[in-house]
Image (cartoon, rainbow, N blue to C red):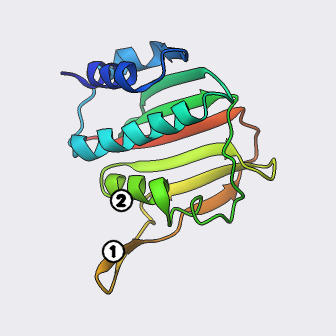
Amino acid sequence: MNFYNRVKKLIKSRLSKDLIIDLKELRKVGQVLNVYIDTNLFFRSLEQILEWININKAKSNEVSFSLTDNGQYYQFEIFHKKSYISYKPNNPKILGQQGDFDKIRRNLFSVADWEIETILDDKKYYKIICLDENTAMERNGRKNIISENRIETLGNEINGVKHILKLYKN
């Protein structure tokens, strides 16, 4: 099953039926995507992101998915339009040190880069860099600890929550 069909199947099984879903920008590249990743960890992470959209569907019922070929990598975007994240920038969850954020970061570590563009509780626009080439994992006793998310102020407004996943080519 190709990437497009697998994502489409997951969306149909996991997202609420009352959401308006746009897959137009996913089909073309999604049918020929060629990456070598741990698909189980990737799709587990995707399931959690879809669950967040379900939880926050009262904020907005519009979701779009896109996939573009950017030369060295594919950029997969999930955009929950007109939504927002109800935390302050210094919240431990936003910093990726607790809960589902930490779980997704562990699943996607060495699988994909991940960032989120959104508005937070303080009504400012941010880019939350969850995983990239600067993210480190350290051993602390018996536990592996991933460095905190980096949070940057966005220079532009964003009307929603956009998850950006970079999948590097073979």
Residue in the picture at 62% in, 37% down: 161
Dots 2, 1 in contact, CB < 8 A: yes
What amino acid does circle 2 point to? Arg
Q: Is residue 21 left or right of residue 59?
A: left
| Residue 16 on image: x %, y % | 48, 21
Judging by the rendered image, the residue that carries numbered circle 2 is 106
Residue at disc 2, secondary structure: helix
Query: On the image, which quarter does residue 76 sit in?
Result: top left
Q: Is residue 131 visible?
A: no
Quarter that holds the C terminus: top left
Q: Residue furthest bottom?
A: 141
Across the whole image, how many numbered discs are drawn on residues? 2
Callout 1 crowding tier (Cα within 10 Å): few <14, some 14–19, many ≥20: few
| Residue 164 on image: x %, y % | 50, 40
**113 shown above or below 79:** below
**121 shown above or below 137:** above
| Residue 73 on image: x %, y % | 36, 40
Quarter that holds the N terminus: top left
Which mark is first along the chain, 1 or 2? 2
Callout 2 crowding tier (Cα within 10 Å): few <14, some 14–19, many ≥20: some
Judging by the rendered image, the residue that carries numbered circle 1 is 144
Query: On the image, which quarter does residue 150 sit in?
Result: bottom right
Tag of residue 156? none
Mark 2 vs mark 1, CA separation in Å: 9 Å
Residue in the picture at 66% in, 45% down: 85
Residues 93 and 42: in front is 93
Residue in the picture at 50% in, 64% down: 98
**61 shown above or below 78:** above
